Amino acid sequence: MSEQRALVVGNWKMNLDHVEAIHLVQQLGVLLRAHTPERTDVVIAPPFVDLRSACSVIEADRLNIAVAAQHVNPAESGAFTGEVSPGMLKRLGVQSVIVGHSERREMFGMTDEIVNTTVRSALQAGLRIILCVGEGHEVRESGSAIEYVTNQINNALDGVGERHYDQIAIAYEPIWAIGTGVTASSEAVSEMITAIRDILPAGLKKTAAVLYGGSVKPENAEELIVLGRCDGFLVGGASLNAEQFVQIVSNVDGCYGKNR
Ligand code: PEP
């Protein structure tokens, strides 16, 4: 799969207002111009209120950064107070959306069924998705992490047609590693990434980037790519710092391809 590109996605979560977002995108632009990745795509996922500002800076400065939302409601319109639809994101200039992040699943009642409806609706609207899956500590301890995560993926992708395969990336994020400073070992990441690739339909296996997320930093990026055998990262905390985020992108870009 040497022609496949790596992917690094920065999930800003509920951080930075639109003025701060403009500043961070400008900083990313300067640093990425100095360290242009050759085989790595870069995506940022700011809060909803920052999306248009981020898109405007990227368009004006012709930056090679794509913009993702962190969540979307599957409905096209209607009485869903506080929500936004896939069509609204698309018309705003947003290319991708994170679906099923563990924080949405745990704090906002996002079940596997809702994840599946959201995945299908976002794909239908022409958005790319970063589908998040991952087990909690208890599941990991019980020894059923692979079964748990592969079930999450099968449920999320149920009914998704082949024509959408090139819109899909998957992020394996063990919940116990998110925002904790505890990174999964490269052996555990490699085992899970391999198990995920094994259950994907042939067409999707060819195109889908399978990412790791959970306390990724510049210092552990290379090992997680080479030994963890992932196609890139979903980065939380470190994506709020332009230098660290671009360093992660550069480290991925420097070693991606040596692991396949
Ligand atoms: C995340 O929020 O998806 C994440 C991986 O966060 P962090 O990198 O901070 O662990």
Image: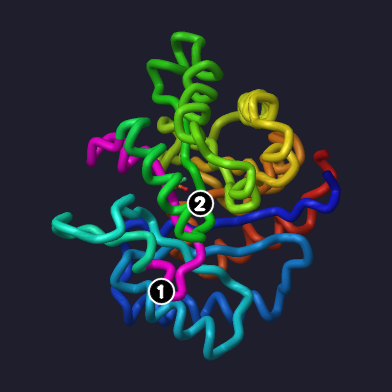
Counting from the top left corner in percent of width and height, residue 205 is at 71, 37
- Range drawn in magenta: 89-110
Which residue is at the front of the view, 22 or 80?
A: 80
Give the amino acid at mark 1.
Arg
Viewer can see residue 190? yes
Is residue 199 located in the magenta-colored stretch of the structure? Answer: no
| Residue at 28% over, 35% down | 106
Q: Looking at the figure, which quarter contains the C terminus?
A: top right
Which residue is at the front of the view, 216 or 78?
A: 78
Q: Which residue is mark 2?
A: 129
Determine the secondary structure under disc 2.
strand
Q: Quadrant of residue 115?
A: top left
Is residue 108 located in the magenta-colored stretch of the structure? Answer: yes
Determine the secondary structure under disc 1.
helix
Q: Are marks 2 and 1 in contact (CB under 8 Å)?
A: no
Counting from the top left corner in percent of width and height, residue 150 is at 54, 24
On residue 91, the disc is: 1
